[in-house]
Amino acid sequence: MIQFIADSLVLACLYALASMGFVIIYRSSRILNLAHGELIMLGGYFGFVIIPLLGGITWAGVILAFLCSFVLGLLLYFLFIRPLMGEPLFAPIMLTIGLSIMLKGIAGFIWGADPRMLTLSLKIPDAPHQIFTDLILSTYDIAIIFAAIFFLGGILLFLKYSRLGIQMRAAAESHLLASQRGINILAILALTWSIAVITATAAGILYGASVNISPETGLVGIKALSVAIVGGMGSIVGIIPAALIVAFAEYGVSRYIGPELSEIIPMAIMLLVLLIRPWGLLGTKEEVERL
Amino acid sequence: MPGSGYFKTSYFDDMRLVNTRFRLFWVMVLYLGLVLFPFFSSSYYIHLINLVLINAIVALGLNILTGRAGVISLGHAGIFAAGSYAVAILGMQQNVPFLLVLPATLVVGAVFGLVMGLPSLRLRALYIVLGTMAMHFILVYIGKKYQSLAGYHWGISIPDPSIGPFVLNSTIKWYPVLIIILWLVTIFCINLLRSRVGRAWTAIGERDFVALALGIHVGYYKILAFVFSSALVALGGGLSAYYTHFVTAETYTISLGVTFVAMILIGGLGSITGSFLGALFVTILPYALSGIFGILPLPLIFEARRASIELILFGFFIILFLIVEPKGLAGIWKMIHDYFALWPFRYRRSVITR
């Protein structure tokens, strides 16, 4: 039983990490980034390619991977999202669909369709650790938990106390008012995209390390999206209960009913939330009206 | 047609689809081309065109919803699957004749469209996308479950359908059937879109608050758009199940739904011509690529990873059209058309219809 709870907790942390990017981008620019799953996948490949460059897993390698994703985020914003600013919301969403197809194709072209184990290139064995008598967690499970706490806490603190974070919250409230108070709205929006891509990379590396990475990994993004919806698209704190609900439900169903059904549990929960409380657990009601 | 010299003198003239002699001429050329095409072409090309025709039905259906009513749906691959399973259950297991199964797929699609559209009563644009996506996974799961319960673990194979004594067992025999079905669907769509219902959809797609203020029941018409588009998409799914002889849940991925959206985006949102052009483009692209790779001396890896290159091109074209020409191929077609229609003048006439 403890094992079950711990495993669900690890899954919840992974979902929290993966769904953060949706909320960050949605809050700042009201764009639903349907390419986020593919960014997670690309992050996994970044880990696969970049981290071994600096010899096994070192902090330098991880930071280099994050720097690359930072640049990728800026590029995405200025190449694709910026030209569509001011258009009806329809266009950017469609654009992210196109982007997701393209990223999937690029990854498939460069690295092939076979799933790869990231563990091999990271040179850290995925060793089991016995924490209690009936609780075993692997190295990467522990890494996932710490990464989720680090990123979630880091972003919440960043938004609350840092100057840039406060500017981001202002931009999320209203682009026009924020820009009239002298906030460089372009820089802020580009920065949120970068941060979102960095969290995607973290999620991708950890997912790739504990499962595997292939061009189809982007489908994780759909489950993460359901977490973001359940928590409320505009609320970062909402991710925590949402990730717990989705992960426990999915794991519980897979354990007690059947793994086939568990695949669609996140979708079913999302549909239920959309029908009953479209703005999510901790979102605000105006969120839905404003679109 | 402003400045053309054709004047409408009766209501009948106003309602006619082919209202000028110029148009009549070109429509006749089109029909003649469609009739003569199989005589001058190999069965491989007829097969390609058949696939385009099936996809065009899907594109027309989706365009009603996305192009007109302005609701993006990523779930129509699920509806497509529902149409295919309807064929598998009715046509294969119950031996219902082909001509009865097709209306049945329409009904199945309409019912699932109704279910899929229900959340749209409460949700606005962005959230409906997610609702339809969730519905896709649930529909495909039901299909998968049916397959495993009924004992078709590897997929359901479907025999050649027949209309009376006429067995559809080759591409050349399929061609006229598909042409006729597509013709009916097209005429239906054109007339539907210019009727009261179609105009209500256009109003909702442009701005739903304004539509509401004009006295249009937004929820009702949105659900109606879901019903009609899903019915057509399910018809496409049913035809494709008959045509490919095989139904399995692995075909109906979320990528298929995205491909449908790609068709209407590249073709042109809300445009009938655009649906055809988009279906043509998206269906032919993979075959054209393999043809190009056969000619060009490229490294082997290009051939081995052709599927990935297709994806890159799909994505690239979607983004390109969104940023550069949001009206898609139909917009380009219209630009060329206008250029020659207005020659030697260069001013743009006011655009009334989309």
Image (spheres, helix red, strand yellow):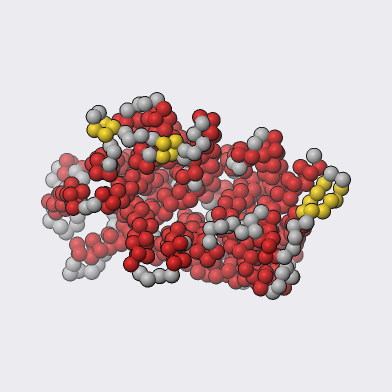
Left or right: residue A106 versus residue B178 is: right
In this rendering, does residue B79 appear at all? Answer: no
Left or right: residue A68 versus residue A11 is: left
Most extreme residue toward the front, as rendered?
Answer: B300
| Residue A148 in which image quadrant | bottom right
Left or right: residue A6 versus residue B140 is: right
Relative image position of residue A267 (x, y in whole percent): 59, 42
Residue for point 37% across, 42% down? B244
In this rendering, does residue B308 appear at all? Answer: yes
Question: Could you say which is closer to the camera, residue B297 or residue A164?
Answer: B297
Residue for point 82% across, 53% down? A129
Left or right: residue A175 versus residue A254 is: left
Residue for point 28% across, 63% down? B335
Residue for point 23% across, 29% down? B165
Most extreme residue toward the right, as rendered?
Answer: A133
Q: Is residue B100 above or below residue B46?
A: above
Question: Could you say which is closer to the camera, residue B228 or residue A8?
Answer: A8
